[in-house]
Amino acid sequence: MRPFARASYRVELKDDAPEMWVMAQGSPVPFTTETYRPDGDYLAYSVGVAAPLQAGLTAVAGVSGTAGRGDLSTTAFRVGVQGRF
């Protein structure tokens, strides 16, 4: 088994509201709008384990997410098998 971990502290320096844009297929002009508030500083993390199974296959399990973003904080769980070919 191989444990892994990653953490990063993300800093918003401009305090600009993030923008989102959408362009319908065939439309010459995108629709752009600001999201409801600027991003703040927050922590992004990922931890888990990877275990080799057999030739070229690895089992992976972990959790990742963000913290310090209030209602926008997230957590995701992941379990899977990776293969090389």
Image (cartoon, rainbow, N blue to C red):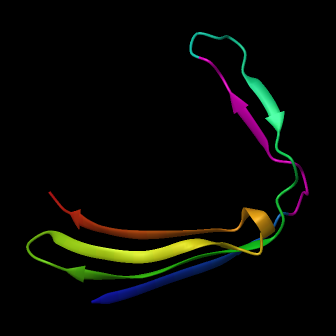
Residue stretch in magenta: 13-24
Q: Is residue 45 magenta?
A: no
Splitting the image into 4 quarters, where does residue 41 fall? bottom right
Main SS type for the magenta part?
A: loop
Image vertical order of residue 17 relative to residue 42, above or below: above
Q: Is residue 21 within the magenta segment?
A: yes
Q: Residue 64, relative to residue 20: is it above or below?
A: below
Total number of numbered labels? 0
State the residue at coordinates (77%, 75%): 68
Measuring from the top left, give residue 19's x and y in whole percent: 79, 41
Q: Residue furthest left?
A: 55
Residue 49: % across, % down = 36, 83
Q: Residue furthest right?
A: 15
Which quadrant does the N terminus fall into? Answer: bottom left
- Check the image and report above or below for 30 versus 5: above
Vertical position of residue 63 compared to residue 84: above or below: below
- Residue at image x 83%, y 63%? 12
The residue depicted at 53 percent of the width and 73 percent of the height is 64
- Quadrant of residue 82 within the rendered picture: bottom left
Q: Quadrant of the C terminus?
A: bottom left
Task: Compare residues 38 and 10 and report the one nearer the observer.
Answer: 38
| Rendered location of residue 25, percent (x, y) | 56, 15
Q: Residue at x 74, y 62 (%)?
A: 72
